[in-house]
Image (cartoon, rainbow, N blue to C red):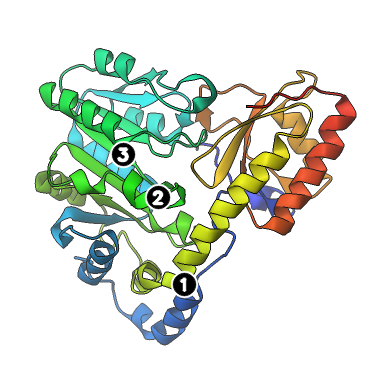
């Protein structure tokens, strides 16, 4: 099993969990009310077609048909099922990125190629090396914004990539699990090009933005109906449970929660970044998501040792294992509310400035 964040069960469950990049506003109140009102729904099986769920997603996304949506047990579930359904020989992913992509490709018996596409400081991409490497009938899987670097790929770059993939009869999967945290996220998403390109699958997760990872709800969006049918054939019956159906009935319409989240991420992302770059011994990369990627500059301490020290402050961070192409000096932290962010800032100062490390500003 791959390493993931949020494993508070191996530690004191009262830790401040900076390893799991989940909305700190928590579960929307609308879901709490809907769950209570719909408790009787648990006495019957979910709809095998998930029609109401897909209708709610379609309304939230806008300008797509319910026939373009495939729900699943989280975004990762859709990724695994899609790669198994495509039956292509090659998978291209970026480095660094989420390690489940490689694992999913290998499980689908694909040859996985990891390509360095990120510019220095992870503030952009250079897709030429990727485009030049792609063989006929391949799949390219990219995370946007990328996990763990927070890098956002521009639409123009994706469009150039899609045109080249059409020439090689290849497919693009974009994992947009964190897209709602990106600045002007509706403009950043590639959803509007679904109808134009049938070699495009976009994957979303309802659980990150809406602060409810325990509700496993992800969905894929594509105009390729044959791919949707093939994915459905690979899925077990009732892959989405009733609780997730109930969540989908209300969270996408919760404007108050959505607006509060957008206000929070815009404020706290810049606040936490500005405070962290003042700490000796840290290199902090700018992010377009709800997490920050960092590097320890003093090789006397790595991320694993830092985590041990942070346990004394009741703090859990995301270690480099679980991501390909990163060093033991890299780690990731979630962006939380102001109180918890200040606790992290103070704790890192206590630990790192005691070691007389040097500061690097980006």
Q: Categorize mark 1 by other alpha carbons within 10 Å: few (<14), some (14-19), many (20+).
A: few
Residue 13 seen in the current view? no
Count of numbered circles on the image: 3
Q: Secondary structure at mark 2?
A: loop
Residue appearing at x 61%, y 45% in the figure: 270
**Disc 2: which residue:** 184
Q: Quadrant of residue 247?
A: bottom left
Disc 1 versus disc 3: nearer the observer:
1
Q: Categorize mark 2 by other alpha carbons within 10 Å: few (<14), some (14-19), many (20+).
A: few
**Disc 3: which residue:** 174
Residue appearing at x 44%, y 79% in the figure: 35
Residue appearing at x 27%, y 68% in the figure: 56
Residue appearing at x 37%, y 78% in the figure: 42
**Disc 1: which residue:** 256
Structural distance between the alpha carbons of marks 1 and 3? 28 Å
Q: Residue furthest right?
A: 354
Q: Secondary structure at mark 1?
A: helix
- For residue 297, the mark is none
Side (left or right) of 236 relative to 147:
left
Q: Earlier in the sequence, mark 2 or mark 1?
A: 2
Side (left or right) of 111 relative to 136:
right
Residue 221: % across, % down: 23, 50
Residue 288: % across, % down: 49, 41
Pick whichever, 193 or 218, lies toward us.
Answer: 193
Disc 2 versus disc 1: nearer the observer:
2
């Amino acid at each position: 099993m791959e390493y993931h964040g949020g494993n508070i069960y191996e530690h004191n469950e009262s830790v401040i969990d900076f390893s799991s990049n989940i909305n700190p506003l928590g579960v929307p109140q609308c879901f709490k009310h809907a769950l209570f009102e719909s408790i009787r729904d648990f006495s019957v099986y979910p709809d095998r077609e998930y029609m109401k769920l897909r209708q709610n997603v379609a309304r939230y996304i806008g300008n797509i048909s319910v026939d373009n949506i495939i729900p699943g047990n989280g975004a990762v579930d859709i990724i695994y099922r899609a790669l198994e359904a495509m039956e292509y020989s090659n998978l291209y992913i970026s480095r660094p990125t989420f390690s489940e992509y490689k694992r999913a490709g290998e499980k689908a018996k694909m040859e996985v190629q990891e390509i360095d596409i990120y510019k220095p400081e992870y503030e952009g991409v250079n897709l030429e090396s990727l485009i030049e490497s792609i063989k006929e009938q391949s799949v390219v899987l990219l995370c946007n914004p990328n996990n763990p670097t927070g890098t956002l790929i521009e639409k123009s770059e994706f469009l150039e990539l899609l045109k080249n993939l059409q020439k090689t009869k290849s497919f693009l999967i974009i994992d947009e699990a964190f897209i709602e945290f990106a600045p002007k996220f509706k403009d950043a998403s590639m959803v509007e090009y679904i109808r134009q390109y049938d070699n495009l699958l976009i994957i979303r997760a309802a659980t990150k933005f809406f602060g409810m990872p325990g509700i496993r709800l992800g969905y894929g969006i594509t105009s390729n109906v044959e791919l949707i049918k093939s994915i459905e054939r690979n899925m077990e019956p009732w892959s989405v449970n009733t609780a997730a159906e109930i969540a989908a009935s209300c969270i996408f319409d919760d404007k108050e929660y959505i607006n509060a989240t957008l206000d929070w991420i815009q404020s706290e992302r810049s606040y936490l970044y500005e405070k962290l770059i003042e700490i000796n011994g840290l290199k902090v990369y700018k992010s377009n998501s709800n997490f920050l990627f960092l590097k320890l500059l003093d090789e006397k301490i790595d991320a694993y040792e830092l985590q041990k020290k942070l346990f004394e402050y009741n703090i859990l961070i995301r270690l480099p294992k679980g991501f390909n192409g990163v060093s033991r000096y890299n780690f990731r932290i979630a962006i939380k509310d102001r109180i918890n962010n200040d606790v992290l800032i103070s704790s890192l100062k206590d630990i790192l400035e005691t070691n007389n490390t040097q500061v690097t500003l980006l």
